[in-house]
Amino acid sequence: MKRMNRRTKALAVSIAAAVVFLLIYLLGILIPDNAVASGFLQAKLPPSWEHPFGTDALGRDLLMRTLKGLSVSMTIGIAASGLSAVIAACIGIVAASGSRRADAFISWLIDLVMGIPHTVLIILISFSLGRGLKGLLVGVMATHWCSMARLIRGEVLQLRNRQYVTMSRRLGKTECWILVHHLLPHLLPQFFVGIVLMFPHAILHEASISFLGFGLPPEQPAIGIILAESMRYISVGMWWPAVFPGLMLVLLVLLLDRLGDNLRIVLDPYSAQE
């Protein structure tokens, strides 16, 4: 590792983080439903070799529920961050390439959405759509595009004034051709890094909304549901239903944040010689 430059180290860390993320996701998907079934004879057991995270009040293994809940949160995070990134890219390009009125309206819309706390706006959207997976997904998707849209808008404004873009216009190239050949190659690295950096925020908001009771239904094995259930028994000494799932959620968010930072270094051309 000492002989590696900064980009090589960042690439190695990114691959390792991606492998861990994929492993957690696959483990959660492959866990059968009977592994998290209720068993009242094993209810409220503390952590042991048989149950490393202990069991909850219904006798369900918390390690299995945590892994399954993380896979649910990852699925929602992937869908919400991907759709938000697409919305942000389209809005950012339209704002920078369109008329002044369109740019002014989109800038006003971004300021309006960013001025409302994300948690409050997600709760309102989720409640208006009947809660559940649909409301939660739409709420997270509709609140996480603003920062990326503003970033892409600024990047497109800078690229439009570049000499090679101006030369392409004088040669008769259409705006669609300029977008595909000049703008998108510069925007794709920021697009992928934006998705990765948006991912942990989407997971945290999904967990917080489900914890408050406005997200996924109670029978769904999500991290927010597990933490909400643990609050009923933490005062009687059952600390493990809250500690271990919470730690797993924090570690996953830190892992994704580290992955995004290292991916930015790998894709940044200015760090090629570092």
Image (cartoon, grey):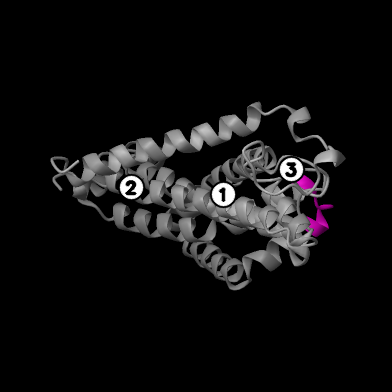
Res 262 label = 2
- Give the alpha-carbon distance from disc 2 to disc 3, as whole Å: 31 Å
**Residue in the image at 56% along x and 47% along y:** 81
Q: Residue at coordinates 38% horizontally, 41% vertically from top-left?
A: 188
Residue 68 x, y percent position in the rendering: 67, 38
How many angstroms separate mark 1 from mark 2 (CA)?
21 Å
State the residue position of label 1: 248
Report crowding for label 2: few under 14, some 14 to 19, many 20 or more residues within 10 A (C-alpha).
Answer: many
User: Is 27 inside the magenta-drawn segment?
Assistant: no
Q: Nearer the viewer, residue 57 or 118?
A: 57
Label whose residue precedes the other's in the sequence (1 or 3): 3
Circle 1: residue type = Met
Q: Amino acid at mark 3?
A: Pro
Instruction: Give the percent coordinates (x, y) of residue 260.
Output: 40, 48
Front one among 161 and 204: 204
Tag 2: amino acid: Asn
Which span is picked out in magenta?
Answer: 126-133
Disc number lying in front (2 or 3): 3
Which secondary structure, mark 1?
helix
**Residue at image point 27% right, 56% down:** 161
